[in-house]
Amino acid sequence: MATEPKDNAAGGTPKQTTLEGGTKKTTPGGATKSTAIGDATCRGGWSFWLKIILPAGLLAGINYRQFGLLAEDWQDPNWSYGWLIPVLSLYMLYVRRRELLTASAGRRVWPWGLVLVAAGCAAQVFGYWIQNPLTCRLSMVLLIFSLVLSLAGPAVTRLVWLPIWYLALAFPIPSIYYSRLAGPLQDLAAQGAGAFLGIFGAQIDVAASTLSIVTISGAAQTLTVEEACAGMRMLTAFLALSVAMAYLADRRGWQKITLVLLGIPVAIVCNVIRVTITCFMFLIDRPEMGRGFMHEFAGYLMLVPAFLLLWLADKLLRGLVVEVEEEDQEKKKTDVPMLAHGALENHTISDADELVRRSLCEAGTPTAHLQQADLRHGQDAHGTHGRYARATADGLARRSRSARATAKITFAAAIVMLCATAAGANLSRWTQRLPVVWPAGVVVRDDFSLANMPGRLGPFVQVDSDLTGDGRPDGEIILSRGDMELLGIGGGRDRDRYAARQSNWYSCRIYRDERVTDPASPFRYWRLEIYYYTGIGDQVPHVPERCLAAAGSRITGSGSLPVSLNRPGWPDRAEMRKIIYVEPPGKSLLPRTFVQYYMFSLNGRPEQAWEKVRLEILMPSLDLARRCYFAKMQFAPLGSPADQSRADEKAAEFAGHALPAALANLPTGMDVETQNKASRDGGN
């Protein structure tokens, strides 16, 4: 607000009245405090904390479900480092606390940031409607960034953008992308370990991710680098470590980027060392040292060389550049402090014009420093500077009132959008799919494997021999914990729903055609798999096209196979999806072609395309008929058929026996509708 200088009747020092933060203050000699206009509301008081606590509280209320899911995800050994990411992010902010205080002193809102706030709010609602955790979590980070940009301004955002987006490294990668990244890393780890041990004369052959070792006692050992040992855990953890080191280091921009990128090869090298240590234990006939606790401990031990390698890289990067001290640091000083200390008293009116104009452009916001400098030194014998000071003060006051109004409107708009997001996320219950209860007679063990699939399917009989050499009977393959995690079965929600007969489950068996006596026939053995999912989000795990490609296979063709279902409550006929693929290089001397067939049961009706299954799961259900399940039924001959038409003929025959037995364990469309009606009527 404008200040009016008044002369003392006794000819003494004039008094001046100013408005600071809405409070009138009168000081002798025009001396005023150096607090900026409106500074009380910007840097302290209930208004300041309201602008922090209210948006933070709304964000926490919108995403409270994600915090619980993240805590569950961090219990997975692959993502156990996740809880460290928020701690490191807060530490990054703490290290820059002085710069943040300086930047926030002259901060201004940036209304255009509301565009990003709106985008983040829309992404949050969309993520909850399709029940996709990664979309919800990334949009939460986007909202934090856009709120800081809008309410604190670009100066503060430049200091905090990396600690904010750093939070995204705490989010687990979706399983389908995890598998695609892990496949090449598995092969690289196996080949690196084989090459390293080969230097020392070890007899070792490497095929893709499998190592065949001849131990010092002459025994043959076969090791496979599993997906859990591909190095993804190290890659993500060491990448997070390198980003933190780069941010905290006082380095040039290109040095920081180089340090971050070096985290990738460091992780790969450390994982190769870990796999090499495991292979060495088998090589010296100490396999117990390469399994269990020792294997896990070797992974944690790799943190030491990783940190040392990154520290050494940082030292080398620093040594590449010799810092030269600036000769003229005084030229970098801004004009605002000069004005605050009375620089105008030694300048002409044209100099004053230029200094004020430059200070307004560079500072970006009106400050009481400038106003007070004009008033304190604004009068000379002719009163020229006094008139100039009064005009400048009037302009600054008008701009100050306009800035405060803009800040209030921007804050109110952000709060309204957050409230709308909270309402939209709550309405996402319309898209949440409740679990479907298994039919009567279905028996699922506490390891989530189906117990009552028949041992005979017409001429196909369940086998009990070890066909794959993995040490377990293949008549009923019990999946490992890692495989179940990849398939999305047996997690916390399944454990909670198991007693109510509403969990996911699976069945994986191998059958032999009794009519085929030729052991070399590709159609002698068939693998049948059933995966049941209910009450889940938009994920459709383990689709052959994606998983085969992730494992290194090459898809060479696709098509459809008409089959007969022969099951009451189901359509008479349906179509199965057919996938033709070539196995990954290195599995055999000559590439072999294989084929797989699969289809879905979606709420009791057959469906071929996984895209349609996912679309129906995420679509809103306005009548609140929200119970939903889908099951994937998949089978394949274990051999490599040369004649695809013959393969289709044999597959249709196997499907005629296998599909009715599989459908007997799945709810029909009538079962789902009955449970939906019970939900609408207030039942369970």
Image (cartoon, rainbow, N blue to C red):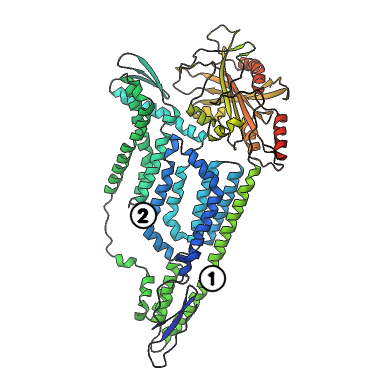
Q: 128 or 314: nearer the eye?
A: 128
- Mark 2 highlights which residue? 95
| Mark 2 residue type | Val
- Seen at 35% across and 19% down, the residue is 204
Location of the C terminus (image quadrant) = top right
Which residue lies most toward the bottom here? Answer: 10
Say if residue 599 shows up in the picture.
Answer: yes
Identify the residue under disc 1.
402
Using a 10 Å C-alpha cutoff, classify the residue at mark 1 as few (fewer than 14 neighbours), some (14 to 19) or many (20 or more). Answer: few
User: What residue is shown at x 69% (from left), y 38% (from top)?
Assistant: 683
- In the image, residue 206 sits, relative to residue 172, either above or below, namely above
Q: Position of residue 457 (x, y in %)?
A: 63, 14
Distance (Cα) linking label 2 and label 1: 34 Å
Q: Which label lies toward us, 2 or 1?
A: 2
What amino acid is at disc 1?
Answer: Ser
Residue 564 locus on image (x, y percent): 70, 20
> Secondary structure under badge 2?
helix
Rendered location of residue 630, percent (x, y): 63, 31
Which of the pair 499/64 is nearer the observer? 499
Q: Is residue 187 above or below residue 261?
A: above
Total count of labels: 2
Q: Earlier in the sequence, mark 2 or mark 1?
A: 2
- The percent position of residue 521, horizontal first and vertical second, equals 55, 10
Classify residue 361 by image quadrant: bottom left
Compared across the picture, whether 333 is left or right of 642 comes to left
8 versus 24 height, above or below: below
Q: Nearer the viewer, residue 29 or 589?
A: 29
